[in-house]
Image (cartoon, helix red, strand yellow):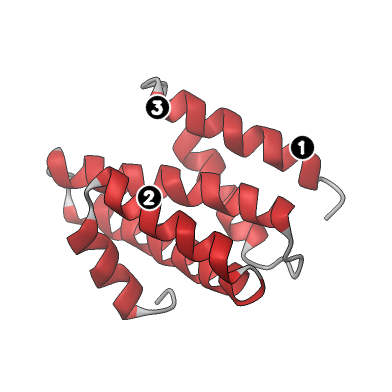
């Protein structure tokens, strides 16, 4: 994965765009990156940065989808990618336990999505 530095910047940019309300293209870019990086075997702080940005966007999309009553098919897709993000973070936590755990606890508490996150985390890997 020679493009790790590029994806650190891209994932941070996508998160900033999402937080500013600029959703156009972000959802598709994040899904593609999650698919790409779920296959990566690199586990270091760079991978942690990428995965944490991507996972935060997915959890924000999950929360937003719940608030906006997205149709079931769309919510199923958001939940699928939330599971992918959780699986990726679990893989990273095996190598970076304190950083990964700290990120999940902070993000879940900050976003107030305890119920959804617990349900997805307890359900395990993507279906």
Disc on the earlier residue, 2 or 3: 3
Residue at the right extreme?
A: 2
**Label 1 with label 2: CB-CB less than 8 Å:** no
Mark 1 lies on a secondary structure that is helix
Residue 111: image tag: none
Q: Residue 44: x, y in percent?
A: 74, 61
Q: Which residue is mark 1?
A: 6
127 sits left or right of 113 in the view: right
51 sits left or right of 71 in the view: right
Alpha-carbon neighbours of circle 1 within 10 Å: few (<14), some, or many (≥20)? few
Within the image, what quadrant is residue 40 found in? bottom right
**Which sits in the foreground, 98 or 85?**
98
Q: At 34% across and 72% down in the image, what residue appears?
A: 121
Q: Which residue is mark 3?
A: 19
Residue 107: image tag: 2
10 sits left or right of 119 in the view: right
Disc on the earlier residue, 1 or 2: 1
**Label 2 with label 3: CB-CB less than 8 Å:** no
Separation of marks 3 and 1 at Cα, in angstroms:
20 Å
Residue 15 to residue 114: above or below: above
Q: At 32% across and 60% down in the image, what residue appears?
A: 79
Alpha-carbon neighbours of circle 2 within 10 Å: few (<14), some, or many (≥20)? some
Mark 2 lies on a secondary structure that is helix
Q: Residue 97: x, y in percent?
A: 57, 71
Q: At 75% across and 70% down in the image, what residue appears?
A: 41
Mark 3 lies on a secondary structure that is helix
Alpha-carbon neighbours of circle 3 within 10 Å: few (<14), some, or many (≥20)? few
């Amino acid at each position: 994965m020679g493009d790790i530095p590029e994806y650190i910047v891209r994932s941070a940019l996508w998160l900033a765009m999402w937080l500013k309300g600029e959703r156009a293209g972000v959802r598709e870019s994040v899904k593609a990156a999650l698919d790409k990086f779920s296959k990566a075997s690199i586990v270091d702080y760079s991978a942690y940065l990428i995965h944490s940005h991507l996972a935060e966007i997915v959890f924000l999309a999950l929360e937003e989808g719940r608030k906006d009553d997205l149709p079931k098919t769309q919510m199923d897709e958001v939940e699928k990618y939330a599971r992918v993000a959780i699986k990726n973070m679990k893989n990273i936590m095996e190598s970076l336990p304190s950083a990964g755990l700290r990120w999940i606890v902070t993000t879940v508490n900050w976003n107030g999505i305890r119920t959804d996150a617990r349900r997805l985390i307890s359900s395990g890997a993507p279906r």
